[in-house]
Amino acid sequence: MIPAKFIAFASLLLGALATPIASPAAEPEAEVAIGSASLIDERGEIVKRVEGVHLINCGPTVNNAFSWRYSVIVYCPNDGNCRYAPNNSNSCKYNYVLTWEGGEKSCKFSTGVTFRWNIMSNAQSLANWSNVGWGNNVYKQFVIRKDDKNVFYKDASGYDCRSIYYSLPN
């Protein structure tokens, strides 16, 4: 004969094993929509295949001081893989230093696409990565942010070409 204590213990044990344990609710994935694209992937990491446009100044860097020689706009079909000297079809080069801020400006690429932008006149006084303006082409709207003047690439003369502003699709 089976003792009553054993039956009670077995019943309790089997009941515990059969009861599902609730797991903590998964955190909802953060997502920032950019038009029809998302900047955050399913793992919560930043997507690096978003197109971008960089507004760049090039020149020598001496004792951490910038001595700009010219400006260039670089279109990046994959902004996460774009840190090299651009070719003629994805760059719009000026033979002088452009004032990026203060009113609407534009540049026509050799492909025929025109990029227009408008950056606040006080943009350089704002914190890095601040939203400082807008840009567009015939295909998309872009949000422009102040960059930290990182070296984007070195040109054929050995000049540092630094990203002054960058823009991503809106």
Image: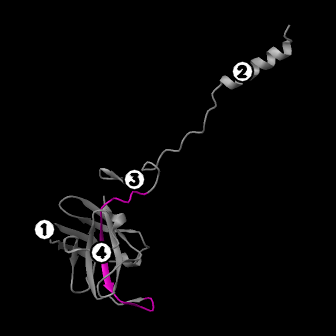
**Residue type at mark 4?**
Leu
Mark 1 lies on residue = 112
Q: Earlier in the sequence, mark 1 or mark 2?
A: 2
**Looking at the image, which residue is at 33% across and 69% down?**
82
> Where is 8 relative to 108, above or below?
above
Mark 2 lies on residue = 14
> Where is 143 relative to 161, above or below?
above
Q: Which residues are magenta?
A: 46-64
52 magenta-colored: yes
Q: Earlier in the sequence, mark 4 or mark 2?
A: 2
Alpha-carbon neighbours of circle 2 within 10 Å: few (<14), some, or many (≥20)? few
**Looking at the image, which residue is at 26% across and 66% down?**
135
Q: Earlier in the sequence, mark 3 or mark 2?
A: 2
Mark 3 lies on residue = 32
Q: Earlier in the sequence, mark 1 or mark 4?
A: 4
> Where is 34 relative to 105, above or below?
above
